[in-house]
Amino acid sequence: MDDHNPDLGFLTHIETVRFSGSIARDEVLSSLASKAVAAGWAKPGYPEALLAREAAYPTGLHARGMDLAIPHADPEWTLVPALVVGILQQPASFQPMGGQGPEVLATFVLLLVIPSADAHVEFLRALTGFIEDQRLLEELGRTQNVELLTEYLRSELQPRTT
């Protein structure tokens, strides 16, 4: 594997959690993080580390077509690359990235469990492409078909030869 292709094996470690009714941000984050720990993708203490990081560095994002959040804890808390997707029937309030602007009423929460800084950057590059495609984002919001997102990411994160 070269430096341009960090290990993104998380695409084989994906779980979706659906939330019905009203739920607070911290409950969503704790639940998703606990799934990652239970699956063996993150270390015990990951939920607390995630909540602390979210408080210091908010991850809410206003995107064209949908509000979402992209939380993660520091790599030291992760064991294997994974993605835990939360789909909320009613949005949860997140603070916006950068801490400025109106609250983000997220209906999708993409918990990144990525143990490598290089892989994290590469994943965010691919995810940004998906988020910037308003048609794809609106389709995800309408259908709640997580496979739409994962197939896009798989195609974008294929190893490239240099």
Image (cartoon, helix red, strand yellow):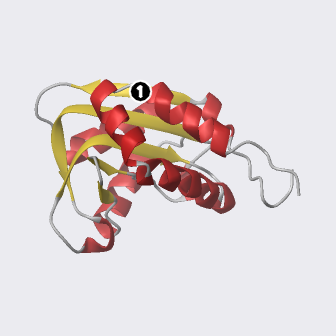
- Do we see residue 40 in this rendering? no
Q: Secondary structure at mark 1?
A: strand
Residue matched to label 1: 16
Front residue (pair 137, 31): 137
Asked which quadrant contains residue 116, the reply is: bottom right
| Kind of residue at badge 1 | Thr
Asked which quadrant contains residue 120, the reply is: bottom right
Residue 49 image offset from top left, x and y in percent = 41, 55
Residue 53 image offset from top left, x and y in percent = 38, 62
The residue drawn where x is 38% and y is 46% is 47
* Rendered view: 57 above or below 113: below
The residue drawn where x is 62% and y is 34% is 11
Residue 67 image offset from top left, x and y in percent = 26, 49
* Rendered view: 8 above or below 54: above
The quadrant of the image that shows the C terminus is: bottom right
In-image side of 113 versus 33 (left or right): right
Front residue (pair 59, 46): 59
- Do we see residue 102 in this rendering? yes
For mark 1, does the 10 Å Cα neighbourhood hold few (<14), some (14 to 19), or many (20 or more) residues? some
The residue drawn where x is 31% and y is 58% is 61
* Rendered view: 134 above or below 97: above
